[in-house]
Amino acid sequence: MRVLVTGGAGFIGSHVLDSAAAAGLTPCCFDRRASPFHPPGEIETVLGDLLDPAQLRAAMEGCDAVVHLAASADVGAVVREPAAAERLNASGTLCVLEAARAAGVAHVVYASTIWVYSDCAAEQVDEREQLGLPGHLYTATKLAGEMYCRSYAELYGLRTTILRFGIPYGPRARAAAVVPSMVERALGGEPLTIAGDGAQSRRFVYVEDLADGVVRALERPGDGCRVYNLVGDRDVSIRAVAETVCEVVGDGEITYVPARAADFGGVAVSGERAADELGWRPQTSFEEGVRRYVAWRLEQQQEEPALAPARLGARLLSATVRLAVPLLLMTALLGTLVAYLLVVGTVDVDLEPGASVLTIAAVLTLAGALTLETGRRLRGVLLHGLWIVAATYLLSLALPWTRHRFGISRGDALTVLVGLSGAALAVALTALVQGVRHRRAAAPAAAPGD
Ligand SMILES: NC(=O)c1ccc[n+]([C@@H]2O[C@H](COP(=O)([O-])OP(=O)(O)OC[C@H]3O[C@@H](n4cnc5c(N)ncnc54)[C@H](O)[C@@H]3O)[C@@H](O)[C@H]2O)c1
C-alpha cells in the first residue's frame, strides 16, 4: 500500500513514516521541509505546500491512502496566528480531501486531538460523545477538519478515519511540550513548575504506540467516516509527570505557581473502540516512555557538538543574569550603608566598618548566588543568600564584638533603620527574583503538548 503522509517531517509524522515502512507499506513524506529525522533518500519525499492543490494532487498520484498530519499543532502558535492556523488546519484539510477525491485515493486518515472533548460536560467520554462548541481556536480548527472528513465521506463516498490523539510524547517531540520542557529543565538543574496543584490529568500516549495505531487504522479502513481515540491506558496527573521526570533524570525540584486560565482540566477518554475494532492498545508505560525520551534526548545532545557552544553561551548568559540580581541587591544595600557612614557619620568617618561588612556580605551573596546557579534541591533555600546579607548586617548591629570591631552604634536609630530597610529590600527582591523565575519556568507549561 502506497501512503502519502502529510507533515511527515514532523514529530508524529516521522514516526508514522517509520511504522508504515516497518509494517511493509510504502510511505511517502509530503512536507514543506525535509525530515530532520531521516537521512536523505531513506524515505521518498515530496517537498510541497499543503495549501497548493496542484502540488498535493500530484503527490497523491498512485497513492492508496493519505495520512493527514500537517497542521499548526502548537497551541501557542495557533493563538499567535489564528488566520494562518485556520488556513492550514481547516482549509488545508479541505485541500487534502479534495486532492484525494480528485486523485482517486481510497482512504484518508485525519489526525485530530482529544482536546475536542475539552468542552464536554461529561467526565468520561468515548467517540459517541456529543461534542460541545469549541472554546479554543486550535480545537475549532481541528474540529473543522473533522467535519470536512465526515462531509466528504457522506457526499463523495471517500472513506475517512478520524483519529483523536491523546497527548503524544517521546523521541523527536517539540521542545515546548510538557514532557520535553520538564525533562529539559530537570537536565539543566532548573525547577519543574506546575500551574495549579498539578492534579489536572492528561491522557498521554507514547508516540511510537501512536504511530502504530495510525498504521492499524490505515490497514482497516471502515465504511464512511469512523472515529477512534488513540490514547494511553491511564490518566497521568501533571504532578505525576513531574515526579516521573525527576525520578528518571535522577534530579529535579518541583515548584507550584497559580493555575492558568482555561486550562484543559482533562477528561477520562476511552480507547476501547480502537482496542475492539483496530486491535490497538498502547504498549508503553508512561515511565518507560519518559525513560526512552530522556535516553533519546541525551543521545541527541551528544550528537550535536556544534550546538554545544550556543547552549553553553545561553547558560552563561542566564547565569550572569541570575547573578546580576543578587549582586545588584548587595550593592544597593551596602551602598546605602556606606552612604550613611559618609553622610551621616560626619565625625570620625571610618570606611573600615563599611568595607568589612561589604566584604562579608559580598562573599556570602556570591556564595549564595553561585549555589543558586549550580545547586539544585538546595536552590530554594539558598536563594535566601540574599537574606543572609541583610541578616549579617543586622547581626553586626546586635553583637557587641562586631559593633566594637566595625565601630557601629546600636543606639543609632538611623543605623537600625538602614539595616531594616536593607532587610526589607532583600525580602522584596527575593520575592521578585522568585516571581520572575517562576514565570519563566511556567511559560513552557502554557502549551501542554497539544
Ligand atoms: N503534538 C501534539 O501534541 C498533537 C496532539 C494531538 C493531535 N496532534 C495532531 O497531530 C498532527 C501532527 O502533529 P505534530 O506534533 O507531529 O506536528 P509537527 O508540528 O511536529 O509537524 C507538522 C508538520 O507539518 C508540516 N507543515 C506545516 N505546514 C505545512 C504546509 N503548509 N505544507 C506542508 N507541510 C506543512 C511541518 O513542516 C511539520 O513537519 C497535527 O495534525 C496535530 O494537530 C498533535
Image (tube, grey):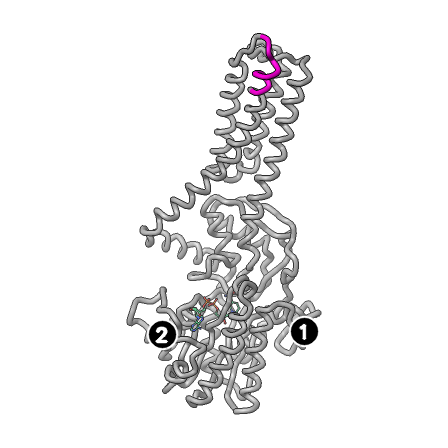
Q: Nearer the viewer, mark 1 or mark 2?
A: 2
Q: Earlier in the sequence, mark 1 or mark 2?
A: 2
* Residue range of the region highlighted in magenta in the rendering: 339-347
Q: Which x, y percent locates residue 137?
A: 59, 69
Can you say which quadrant of the picture contains the N terminus?
bottom left
At 34% from the left and 75% from the top, the residue drawn is 45
Residue at 55% across / 50% down in the picture?
A: 243
* Residue 22 part of the magenta-drawn span: no
Residue ID for mark 2: 47
Q: Is residue 291 visible?
A: yes
Q: CA distance from mark 1 to mark 2?
A: 37 Å
> Taking 243 as reference, is 272 above or below it?
below
Q: Which residue is mark 1?
A: 132
| Amino acid type shown at disc 2 | Leu
Q: Amino acid at mark 1?
A: Gly
Q: Give coordinates of residue 46: x percent, y percent.
A: 35, 76
